[in-house]
Amino acid sequence: MTYLCSMDTIVNKVAESGIVTLNLEQYLPKPEQIASLDIAPFLFKGMILREKDFRTSLLELDWTPFENKQVAVFCSADAIIPMWAYMLLATYLYKCGATPFYGTVAQLTEHLLLQAIDQIDISTYTDSRLVIKGCSDIQIPESAYFKVSQKVLPVVKSLMYGEPCSTVPIYKKK
């Protein structure tokens, strides 16, 4: 932050600049809202999915960890999974109140983040000098920066990336 000292007065120029910061981390889903279901453990000899065995395994599976969660369904093994298997998993997940998603946890997280960005009320950023926070403890997918830029450009006065004290200018309304 930049401070100006005159006599005993310290002035925070960043605070007075009117810059608004948008932190994409706040739109990430909570880890406890997400679960994953790998099909690989259900494979016979790690290669094929046998219908009868699969159905029996699903009947015996404890579905409690998936209740009311977003569930990433994927197969970590290099195997061909028949389409009916995904449909069957979707049915079981539906019954326990889960929302199934085909893909990895990272893909599901990105999907949910992009959905959350779609829901941002951009009217709060009308004519603002907006900084999209750049430094983060959590990896934010590139697609989120692309999406949020696309979302706010019609209303912002200017768009920047980084931190309020050190920004990269992206856009300025003429």
Image (cartoon, grey):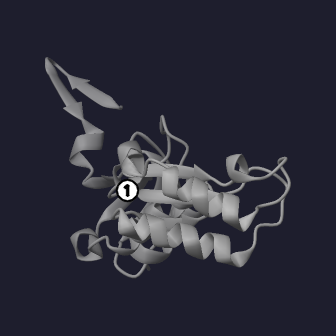
Query: Is 73 drawn above or below residue 139 in the view shown?
Result: below
Who's the residue at 68% across and 58% down the image? 53
Q: Of the residues shown, which amino acid type is indicated by label 1?
A: Lys
Q: Position of residue 8 (x, y in %)?
A: 13, 17
Q: Is residue 37 left or right of residue 65?
A: right
The answer to whether one can see residue 78 in this image is yes
Q: Nearer the viewer, residue 8 or 91?
A: 91
- Quadrant in the picture for residue 156: bottom left
- Apparent side of residue 39 relative to residue 132 in the rendered image (left or right): right
Quadrant (top left/top right/bottom left/bottom right) for the C terminus: bottom left
| Residue 155 relative to residue 42: left or right | left
Q: Which residue is mark 1?
A: 69
* Quadrant occupied by the N terminus: top left
Q: Is residue 114 visible?
A: no
Q: Secondary structure at mark 1?
A: loop
Which percent across, then down, holds residue 50? Answer: 76, 63
Residue occupying the point 40% across, 46% down? 65
Q: Which residue does the image show at 33% across and 64% down from the upper left?
A: 97
